[in-house]
Amino acid sequence: MSKSNHFSTKSVFGQLISLIDDSMIKREVKKCDSDRYTKRFTTKDHLISMLFCSFSKCTSLREISGAMLGLSGKTAGFQLN
């Protein structure tokens, strides 16, 4: 019996994030100069974490970090630094 190719290894959230065009984010970052003083947590990382917060209905930073740490092996598709 052959395996089905209909299922993806990426999570639904990872698939949604991959639909966001990187060039659009870079253009807006350059336009607003939002990464001017950042060292590690960029505008794209902030966007992804806030989308994760909305979709998972988290109400605090502790919940967001706990949920992301709980998915530690599965966050590769999130495109976070």
Image (cartoon, rainbow, N blue to C red):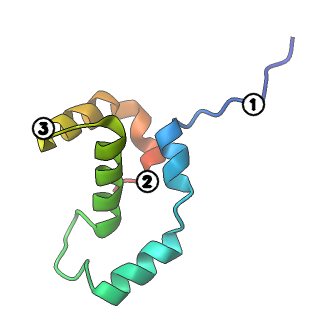
Q: For the residue labelled by badge 1, is the local secondary structure a helix, a strand or a loop? A: loop
Q: Residue at x 43, y 34 (%)?
A: 74
- The Cα atoms of the two marked residues, 2 and 3, are separated by 20 Å
Q: Is residue 36 above or below residue 22?
A: below
Mark earlier in primary sequence (1, 3): 1
What residue is pinned by disc 3?
62
- The Cα atoms of the two marked residues, 1 and 2, are separated by 23 Å
Residue 46 percent coordinates (x, y): 27, 60
Residue 79 got which mark? 2
Q: Residue at x 47, y 42 (%)?
A: 13
Residues at circles 2 and 3 in contact by the CB criterion of under 8 Å: no
Label 2 neighbour load within 10 Å: few <14, some 14-19, many 20+: few
- The Cα atoms of the two marked residues, 1 and 3, are separated by 35 Å
The kind of residue on which mark 3 rests is Arg
What residue is pinned by disc 1?
6
Residue 65 percent coordinates (x, y): 20, 39
Give the left or right position of residue 69, taking residue 2 as reference: left
Report the label total: 3
Q: Between 63 and 73, which is closer to the camera in this rendering? A: 63
Q: For the residue labelled by badge 2, is the local secondary structure a helix, a strand or a loop? A: loop
| Mark closer to the observer (1, 2) | 1
Q: Residue at x 33, y 60 (%)?
A: 47
Q: State which quadrant residue 66 falls in.
A: top left
Residues at circles 1 and 2 in contact by the CB criterion of under 8 Å: no
Q: Is residue 34 above or below residue 8?
A: below
Residue 9 percent coordinates (x, y): 59, 33
Q: State which quadrant residue 31 falls in.
A: bottom left
Q: Between 42 and 20, which is closer to the camera in this rendering? A: 20
Residue 59 percent coordinates (x, y): 17, 39
Task: Classify the position of the C terminus by image quarter.
Answer: bottom left
The kind of residue on which mark 2 rests is Gln
Q: Residue furthest top?
A: 1
